[in-house]
Image (cartoon, helix red, strand yellow):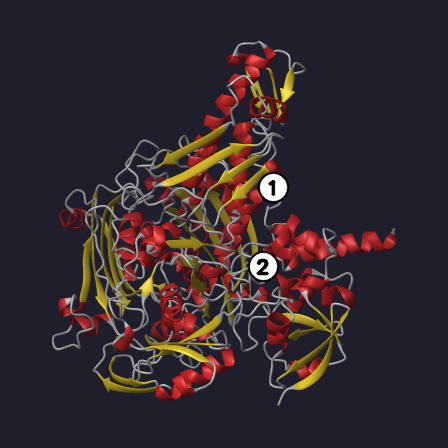
Amino acid sequence: MKTLAKFNVNGEPYELIIEPNLLLIEVLRDELGLTGTKHSCGVGNCGACTVLVDGEPVLACLSLAMAVRDKEVTTIEGLSDGPHLHPLQEAFIDRGAIQCGYCTPGMILTAKALLDRNPEPTERDVREALAGNICRCTGYVKIVEAVLAAAEAMQKGAAR
Amino acid sequence: MNEEFSVVGKRIRQPDGPAKATGEAKFVGDLRMPGMLIAKVLRSPHPHARVVRVDSAKAMALPGVAAVITPDDLGDWNGFDRGMKDLPLVAGGYRIPPEEHVVNRTARHYGDAVAAVAAVNEHIAEEALSLLEVEYEVLPFVLNAEEALGSGAPQVSETAPGNIGKHLSYPYPEGDVDKALAEADLVVEGVFQTTKQDHCTQETAACLAYVDAAGRLNVWSQCQLPHLARRELANIFNLPVKKVKIMTPFVGGSFGQRGSVCAEPVAAALALKTNKPVRLVFSREDNFLGLESRTGFDKINVRMGFMKDGTLTAIKTYMLGHLGGYMGCGPMSSVIGMTLSMGHYRCPNRYGDSDMVMTNIPVSGAMRGFGNDAMMFCIEQLVDEASEKLGIDPITIRRKNTKEPGETAAMGLMLESSYLEECMLSGAEKFGWNELRSRPKKDEGRIKRGYGMATMSHCTGAAPLYLEHSNAMVKVNEDGSVDLTVYPAPVGTHIWGALSQICAEELGIRAEDVNIVTGDTDVTLFEYGSDASRSTYAIGGATLRAARQAKEQLLAHAAAMLEVPVEDLLARNGRVFLKSDPDKGLSVGEVCYDAIYSFGGEATNFSGKQSFEPTWNSPTFGAYFAEVEVDTETGRVRVPRFVTAIDCGKAINPMAVEGQLEGGLQQGLGYALTENFVVNETTGKVETANYDSYKVPGTLDMPHSEVIIVDRPDPKGPFGAKGVGEPGMVGIPPAIANAIYDAIGVRVRGLPMTPERILAALAEKGEAKGETQ
């Protein structure tokens, strides 16, 4: 039976009437049109569908939408403001860390959660944080470089 | 030298970067249309079975179900070859029979499509699938190539008697290989085996199709050969080509998998049947079962003859490959493998042949390397073995046999450029090869460390075997910007950036002033497409020529405006100016504006349109260095460090070249060690249809990687560029195999080199733990 549910996504409130068995990825993509969140393996093995729920990375393909009611959901669309991109987004572009771009939203959001809790990560920290996100194009080299570069840029930005 | 180019050779940002970083980029599965239906495919649970009957009454009765297609509903739709090699693409009359259908009466492998549904949403479509009642007549099946060749083996296809899909020989044999082997001082030989590898594109296969009011079939496709997909779909549905339009949004990876039509036939069929937009997105399992994966070889026999001084005198090969239930792109992987195995070493006596065999497993096809990966795994291990037996250093023996420019390259063409020697030397220096290999071996406990290297060459495009026809159109706007109309596959290779750099360099403008117009067969000229590491070379070649044509008009008009001879002018940094007096000139925009807004009857829009069909190809060369740690207790291999040195001509964008090599390393590492496409020998079921059972390397598995770009221009490539898509992965498995030998003294002849294989090899040598009391 359909239920009225309140969501908070990228700072915007939504009231939706949905089937309670809908997955978070279905609500984001099909109900809200936030197609930046990607579907890939469907079983929680690849990280493509990663979004942030109250700042923590969550796999949207495994989460029921009803479980994130009244929590703050951040998708890739919530990171930029028009042409003003998040330092992670800038670094990914600058460093060639994006090839096909399909894993990129999940990578950037997982990295954001890392930098929010650990602003000065080592290379090892970055590799460990991204261990659940599969990329088939880049070999991860430039992704790891981009996250470290973004961390440095954000530190400099914060110091200013 | 640094001032030679102002745009080429720069590490530019990609034009599609912001769209992809912000989630704005649309992939097929992100597209939707009003009234759109969602399609699903029913797959056979048997490796070989005839569909006797499908009862779709219950499925059709489910509210929200719009259509079901069963083998009874095909009408006059034609069969097809998914690899589109039923079209005249390959020289020499090579054809693949069009045996596959939208859905199939006889399932030829586990997961073959036997029915499809369209419904108003995903959940209803899923439920409709479960309501289809299929009666199967289960048929005997055969899973491996050797058994398929046996007398009395079940027949997979009527067009392949004895299950031999194709018997294919090396196209350029030379000398007398048996005599040379008999006369050789040393013969090294081995029987090798490789495996299917799934491309694991992060975006699964998808298609959105609809029929417009004019009766035209509009298809959003991921196919990397879009103009061929247009013709293939027209053939299947008996439509004139003009009634089919292909569009390509962003595509989440390819590596060869999008070289065939995948989701398109089913989505188009349901769109034609329902007259509604239909979107089909494969699940990950659909991808593993329903798409082509790398062609595996059950057996590769290789014999190589050497003289005492290390001179290679003979190579003889036989490949036994399994094609799966349909021929697809698979057969050519033996031809490409045999051809490229003769690519980088001078060898006067060469012969090879192959049997490509039909089996009841998912279809084999083209994946990055396309058979060269398999042959290099063999050849480069045997060269290593010869070097040890002859007492010659692995690099020295390779240098001795390396081809020079002017000699005959892999495909019977003259070698235009080769810096393989420089790759080996610079790679060895960066890796510390000499020091590491000459260190005394001390007992390191259960973890043994080893160092190995391998080399390879790979084609840039596949001339003269495949069609190599590309086109580009250049239009210069009144502000000096350019619209460049081309159709490379937007699969993530940074090709838009490379083409914008080539165009901008020639016209003397900035890369960011080039707008890529693409993704629509209505707008673009014919494009063979993106495969065989050809896009920068061939589409870039067309782009360079079209830009040059537009530049001639630009310079002529500027010469008239400035009242100077045209040969005195140079276009650079957005300006056209006198070579002798750089201050005297005009901006490119001023010249274009003057030409467009002209009232004298001579108004013109500078433009260029060029077709380019190279009849040659210029191979790329590489040297690969691996450090491994082998755990002799568990058999697990770790690769902590890897160095790749590449001669891909002039790097248009070094950052993009590095990206291709680093990405190739991930795929090569998986192919070498963990990616195992497992088919159950009893049931024919694919046991590895998602990432939980099929291990793709993650961040923690990746070595510390260093890339050296030799960066020497090729005489014929655009600004000296050669291909770099496939080379990234080809040399990885043999470098790792040779390092494993250095570590533990055993040769692993099968891929992937799993812990089980390592332990078995150690046991054979009598060194596995527990056997050495």
- The crowd level at tag 1 (other Cα within 10 Å; few <14, some 14-19, many 20+) is some
Q: What residue type is labelled 2?
A: Tyr
- Residue B299: give x, y in percent of width and height: 26, 65
How far separated are the C-alphas under marks 1 and 2?
A: 18 Å
Residues at marks 1 and 2 on the same chain:
no
Give the secondary structure at mark 1: loop
User: What's the chain of the residue with tag 2?
Assistant: A
Task: Tell me which residue sits at (23%, 77%) in the image.
Answer: B142
**Residue at 53% across / 67% down in the picture?**
B34
Per the image, label 2 sits on a secondary structure element best described as: loop
Marker disc for residue B393? none
Q: Please state if B435 lies on the left or on the right of B176 as rendered.
A: right
Q: Residue B571 sits in which quadrant?
A: top right
Instruction: Tell me, yes or no, if residue B383 can be seen here.
Output: no
Viewer-side residue, B111 vs B610: B610
Query: Considering the image in quadrants, where does the N terminus of chain B appear?
Result: top right
Chain identifier of the residue bearing label 1 in the image:
B
Q: Looking at numbered disc 1 in the image, what kind of residue is underneath it?
A: Arg
Residue at 67 percent across and 81 percent down: it is A17
Q: Which residue lies furthest to the left in this view?
A: B151
User: Would you say the residues marked 1 and 2 are in contact, meaning their CB atoms lie under 8 Å apart?
Assistant: no
B101 and B286: which one is in front? B101
Q: Which mark is residue B11?
A: 1
Q: Which percent across, then down, holds residue A47?
A: 59, 70
- Comparing labels 1 and 2, the label whose residue is closer to the camera: 1
- Does residue B580 sit above or below B733 in this rendering? above
Q: x and y percent of residue B756 in the render?
A: 41, 76
Q: Quadrant of the C terminus of chain B?
A: bottom left
The foreground one among B98 and A101 is: B98
Q: Name the residue under label 2.
A: A140
